[in-house]
Image (cartoon, rainbow, N blue to C red):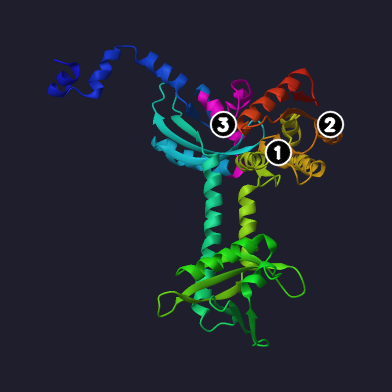
């Protein structure tokens, strides 16, 4: 009889199966703690919180090495944001005397000065040495999740406002002032009806299909889309909307949204297309600003890492014949700057570096913050000599190490980044404030 059948027949539980481990349970736990990919720590709660044991994954999770974190092991509050430290301390004091489990989310500084979100879950353990409570904790880096949640919430709030505004427009559509139109495909005539306090005129345009090809009313980049929407609505029954830039009196363009609907005749074919044109420029600008904020690093106003890589890949894919150079930069002695002058001063250094990059590289380049004190740049149609000169100009104000590589045809950004990263660490191992180019 197979072992599985014997276990099921006699109701042998998983607990009993673990007895096969014999007295080696401590060895098993050590193996688990060493290899598990999540931070685990044992802490004693006294006047401060003292680390008794930390596995290797703990250091990776919070952004430190074992050596760099040693000075904080006797007081882990020192790495936390002060306002979060106070709340966490209150949580500990409330639950520790009762030997209750804890669960708290805190923000803390990593070794490179960047701020992260960390989820802490702890279970009370028996202290056989003194009366201080002891907690076995599991810690997770949830920074990306929190940032994503915040961005989604911000965008959802903006979307709710836009949807509400859209519903208001629909409710008022029958009576509100505005610009209405009706197009007759068989006659190729467009009729605009203006319904404003000081403008009640009616404008009729014959041969509209030809007129619209060269019309200055719609921005050139939207003419094709505009004409296709009208053609589709004349061919089949359609109810839809489009957004585009339209010229305004006095010059310039504003965003407009056109709601349109096909009207069928007695023969079942489209007899006309009716609709209403609304100015949505203010709402569009607000939405674009939110999208911009979601894509940008809050401190430096450069692209976030994920967004930068995505745009860089699109940039290369759209122009495979162009010459691209990828650059990764790491500030010299940034940790020492933070330790000596504080994180606020360090933030100013990062912003200065971001401003310097945007000043030496023009709009043909994509610039992002990779994280901490590292920045990435993708240049287009610039020879290496120009890339090098601009980096040299930047070194006059800020000391950094840079790795530069030429992107190969068909190479993805991850591979390109890995080559540039190796180049940067080559120069870091040789000298400070240097640039290394890898063929």
Depth order, front residue of 356/90: 356
Q: Is residue 83 above or below residue 70?
A: below
Q: Is residue 427 left or right of residue 267?
A: right
Q: Are marks 2 and 3 in contact (CB under 8 Å)?
A: no
Depth order, front residue of 279/218: 218
Q: Is 310 one of the magenta-colored residues?
A: no
Label 2 Cα neighbours within 10 Å, binned few <14 / some 14-19 / many ≥20: few
Mark closer to the observer (2, 3): 2
Residue 86: x and y, percent? 56, 43
Q: Are marks 3 and 1 in contact (CB under 8 Å)?
A: no
How far, Cα to Cα, is label 1 from label 2? 35 Å
* Residue wearing tag 1: 343
User: Magenta residues, as a range?
Assistant: 57-83
- Does dot 2 land on a helix, a strand or a loop? helix
| Quadrant in which the C terminus is drawn | top right
- Does dot 3 land on a helix, a strand or a loop? helix
Q: Earlier in the sequence, mark 3 or mark 1?
A: 3
Q: Are marks 1 and 2 in contact (CB under 8 Å)?
A: no
* Residue wearing tag 2: 385
* Residue wearing tag 3: 62
Mark closer to the observer (1, 2): 2
How far, Cα to Cα, is label 2 from label 3? 40 Å
Residue visible at 57% across and 78% down in the picture: 181
Q: Earlier in the sequence, mark 1 or mark 2?
A: 1
- Does dot 1 land on a helix, a strand or a loop? helix
């Amino acid at each position: 009889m197979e072992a599985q059948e014997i276990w099921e027949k006699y109701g042998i539980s998983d607990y009993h199966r673990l007895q096969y481990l014999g007295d080696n349970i401590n060895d098993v736990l050590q193996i688990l703690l060493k290899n598990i990919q999540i931070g685990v720590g044992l802490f004693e709660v006294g006047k401060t919180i003292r680390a008794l044991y930390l596995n290797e994954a703990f250091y990776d999770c919070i952004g430190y090495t074992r050596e760099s974190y040693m000075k904080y092991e006797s007081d882990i509050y020192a790495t936390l944001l002060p306002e979060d430290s106070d709340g966490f301390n209150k949580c500990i004091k409330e639950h520790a005397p009762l030997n209750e489990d804890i669960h708290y989310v805190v923000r803390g500084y990593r070794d490179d000065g960047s701020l992260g979100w960390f989820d802490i879950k702890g279970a009370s353990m028996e202290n056989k040495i003194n009366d201080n409570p002891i907690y076995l904790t599991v810690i997770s880096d949830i920074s990306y999740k929190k940032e994503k949640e915040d961005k989604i919430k911000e965008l959802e709030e903006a979307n709710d406002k836009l949807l509400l505004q859209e519903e208001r427009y629909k409710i008022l559509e029958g009576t509100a002032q505005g610009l209405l139109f009706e197009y007759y495909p068989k006659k190729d005539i467009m009729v605009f009806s203006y319904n404003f306090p000081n403008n009640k005129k009616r404008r009729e345009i014959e041969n509209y299909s030809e007129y619209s090809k060269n019309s200055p009313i719609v921005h050139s980049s939207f003419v094709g889309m505009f004409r296709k929407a009208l053609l589709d609505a004349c061919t089949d029954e359609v109810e839809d909307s489009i957004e585009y830039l339209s010229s305004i009196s006095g010059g310039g363009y504003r965003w407009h949204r056109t709601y349109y609907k096909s009207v069928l005749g007695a023969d079942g074919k489209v007899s006309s297309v009716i609709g209403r044109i609304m100015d949505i420029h203010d709402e569009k600008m607000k939405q674009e600003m939110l999208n911009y904020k979601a894509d940008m690093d809050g401190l430096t106003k450069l692209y976030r890492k994920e967004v930068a890589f995505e745009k860089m890949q699109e940039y290369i894919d759209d122009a495979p014949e162009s010459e691209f150079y990828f650059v990764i930069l790491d500030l010299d002695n940034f940790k020492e700057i933070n330790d000596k002058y504080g994180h606020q001063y360090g933030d100013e250094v990062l912003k200065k570096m971001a401003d310097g990059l945007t000043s030496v590289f023009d709009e043909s380049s994509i610039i992002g913050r990779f994280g901490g004190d590292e920045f990435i740049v993708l240049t287009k149609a610039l020879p290496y000599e120009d890339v090098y000169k601009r980096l040299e100009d930047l070194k006059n104000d800020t000391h950094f190490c840079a790795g530069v590589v030429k992107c190969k045809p068909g190479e993805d950004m991850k591979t390109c980044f890995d080559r540039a990263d190796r180049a940067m660490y080559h120069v870091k191992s040789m000298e400070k404030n240097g640039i290394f180019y890898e063929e």
